Image (tube, helix red, strand yellow):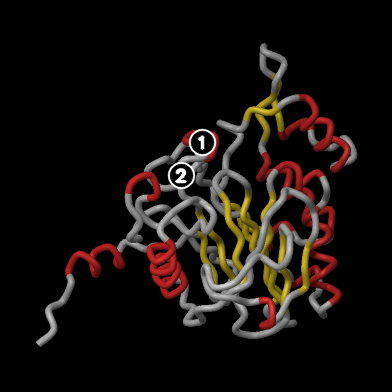
Amino acid sequence: MAVEDKSVKSAYEKVEPVRSALIRCPHGFSTRTGGVSEGIYASLNLGMNRGDDPEKVRENFRRFLDACGIRETAFVCGKQVHENHVMTVGREHAGEPYGYEELFVADGYVTAEKNVPLVIFTADCIPLLMADEQAGVVAAVHSGWRSTVLDIEKNAVEAMTALGAKRENIKACIGPAIGQCCFEVGPEVIEGVDALLDGNAADLYRGKANGKFMLDLKGVVKRSMIRTGLLEHNIDVIADCTMCMPEKYWSHRMIGSGRGSQAAVIML
């Protein structure tokens, strides 16, 4: 008779993705707990380019996707470069963790195909998930400050509407990311934010004596999406700050490069 591995069961039970109450289709934002990775990657590392054991990352993905209600093992992801390219993708773009070479570069993905999970990676930047479930269109976007000021949210919404989504029906969730409490930026970032929001951003940052600013990037992304045509009550914001909560999330600003990565996923 097989003996139950209680340690594996215990770890699995701790995989608790953060979800939005607005989005009904399978989705989730990972935390750093409940996986099998060790050392600096402990424990639910989902980054495939961090130097972690590939077999452990595969198992971490299995647990994370399963906890999100996703039985597919292949998903769409690629190289994120902090720009504003959003790809319209399908099953032909999906692959298993470590099972294929990165064939494309993008910071956002949109699909109207069922059972095609879209995955993006973060460790302070904003993971943004969107869905028009009436039209059958979903999107996953990696939105750091560079992508944001380059209007990646607008590009993602336009890619969704090209597939039949309606702006007034799109539900969006801004996931766990660095908050204004911790996000110190230089004046060049504020210039980009002001340009994006046509000067309507003064309440989203505050100056410091050292000439830098504390920026509410989540607020910037939310306001950008409202300008793009989304309804404010259709935008959910997860309050968690990744830098304030190192026991729950990886933060690049807190830890540096020797760390794991969170992931966000959505699927029709």
| Residue placed under numbered mark 2 in the picture | 259
Q: Is 214 left, or right, of 96 in this rendering?
A: right
Vertical position of residue 193 compared to residue 172: above or below = above
- Under mark 2, the amino acid is Arg
Q: Residue furthest bottom?
A: 1
Q: Residue furthest top?
A: 209
Vertical position of residue 73 compared to residue 19: above or below = below
Q: Is 260 left, or right, of 85 in this rendering?
A: left
Q: Position of residue 33 (x, y in %)?
A: 36, 55
> Circle 1 sits in a helix, a strand or a loop, which is it?
loop
Q: Residue furthest left?
A: 1
| Residue placed under numbered mark 1 in the picture | 256
Q: Name the residue at 54% across, 34% down.
A: 253
Vertical position of residue 9 compared to residue 193: above or below = below
- Under mark 1, the amino acid is Gly
Q: Name the residue at 74% across, 32% down.
A: 203
The picture quadrant where one finds residue 229 is bottom right
Quadrant location of the C terminus in the rendered image: bottom right
Viewer-proximal residue, 117 or 69? 117
**Contact flag, marks 1 and 2 (Cβ < 8 Å):** yes
